[in-house]
Image (cartoon, helix red, strand yellow):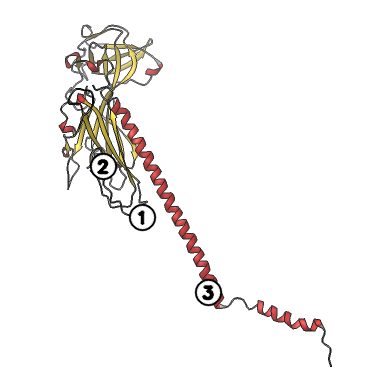
Amino acid sequence: MTHITPQEKTGPRRVISAARSNCGLSLVELMVEITIGLIILAAVVRLFATSRATYTLEEGLARVQESGRFAMEFMAQDIRMAGYAGCSANLSGSQVGNIVALPGSATTFNPDGIAGYKHTCSGSCSGTLTEWDPDVPSEYFPSGSIMPLTGTDVLVIQRADTLSAHLTGQEGKDKDNDDAKIQIIDTTALAGQLAAGDVLMVSDCQSADIFKATTVSSGSDKTTISHSNSSNTSSKLTHSYDNSAQLMKLVTRVYFIGRRGNDTSNPPSLYRKELGNDGSFIVQELVEGVEVLRFSYGEDTDNDRIANIYRDPSSVSSWRKVLSVRTGLLVGTTGNVEQALDTRIYDLAGNTAGPYNDKKRRRAFNSAIRLRNHY
């Protein structure tokens, strides 16, 4: 009988084990592993897509919130100061002279400091300035400029910007110089604040004059401002002033919604136009994504210094009695971030907007802003 050692018994087993390990995976095993891998990959892709959508939505909401807050703050600062004219705010029309050429122009300073224009066209609208009530003056939107969007309002704010500048001596209608001049003491704060073409107001609280500067020159610690009849109806003011009189710069700003280049492919933005010293408007894009701008005006009809009725601009009986402005903004994301269509109706200062039936996220901002200089 042949004796078989333990080594001889285990030898063939090692050969069989090695052979099996070299055979690889069967087709069934391979398909199972591919299926499991695809399931894991799909889960990872879905998780990434969900995270990306959540991030995009949250980023859009944050931008909408920030844009609405900035837009409202920009306008609120000017609306509160509408009609500010220092101590001359309480003067009657006969006490305020205006020698600016074309005093009836829409760009001439309005003592009320505020004017509103409501878009009233519905259906097919072309955006012409006559679609607003009252008609928007063409001086604010000359040919070729960025135009206000239909379905949005236009607001004009005018106020004085205090320069803390006082006259150095006598000036006014009694001065013999045909090209009358105003002289003020130079200060560091005045540097770059005045230029030829600026519309200015001088007031001593007893009377005031509005004029356009024709030249501005500095020397001997004084700034000399001429107001010749090249840009004014007269070279002389209508009242006399001494060194107690204050000089202020008049600011005209127009708020509206428009698109860069009037191109419908660009998102809407809140714009501000400011009257420059050359008679044209400097255009500033303030906040992107503001789609609708609406106003209603709170008028005091019983002289109790409280606004008791909010009206459209054409219904206001006295702008001086407008004590607050109800302001409505609709701000949206610049791209689609929602899964469902936006079918909501938004309330904006008593007006409605929507539905838009797109996948943008929007938010309405409403605020009642008190006018500090109207009583």
Residue at the spot of label 3: 31
Q: Position of residue 370 (x, y in %)?
A: 28, 27
Which type of secondary structure does the marked residue at label 2 adopt? strand
Point out the frontmost of discs 3 and 2. 2
121 and 29: which one is in front? 29
Q: Quadrant of residue 106?
A: top left
Residue at the spot of label 2: 347
Q: Are marks 3 and 2 in contact (CB under 8 Å)?
A: no
Density class for disc 2 (Cα within 10 Å; few <14, some 14-19, many ≥20) is some
Point out the frontmost of discs 1 and 2. 2
Check the image and report above or below for 369 versus 215.
below
Check the image and report above or below for 370 versus 5.
above
If you read the primary sequence from the N terminus, does the residue marked by circle 1 or circle 3 appear first? 3
Density class for disc 1 (Cα within 10 Å; few <14, some 14-19, many ≥20) is few
Q: Is residue 215 visible?
A: yes
Q: Are marks 1 and 3 in contact (CB under 8 Å)?
A: no
Q: Position of residue 59 (x, y in %)?
A: 42, 46
Q: Position of residue 47 (x, y in %)?
A: 47, 57
347 and 252: which one is in front? 347
Q: Looking at the picture, which amino acid does disc 2 mark?
A: Asp
Check the image and report above or below for 111 versus 24.
above
Q: Looking at the picture, which amino acid does disc 1 mark?
A: Gln
Q: Quadrant of residue 320?
A: top left
If you read the primary sequence from the N terminus, does the residue marked by circle 1 or circle 2 appear first? 1
Q: Is residue 140 visible?
A: no
In the rendered view, does 31 fall on the left or right side of 20? left
Image quarter hosting the N terminus: bottom right
- Measured in 3D between alpha carbons, the distance from the residue under mark 3 to the one under mark 2, in whole angstroms, is 58 Å
Point out the frontmost of discs 1 and 3. 1
- Measured in 3D between alpha carbons, the distance from the residue under mark 1 to the one under mark 2, in whole angstroms, is 23 Å
Residue at the spot of label 1: 339
Q: Looking at the picture, which amino acid does disc 3 mark?
A: Met
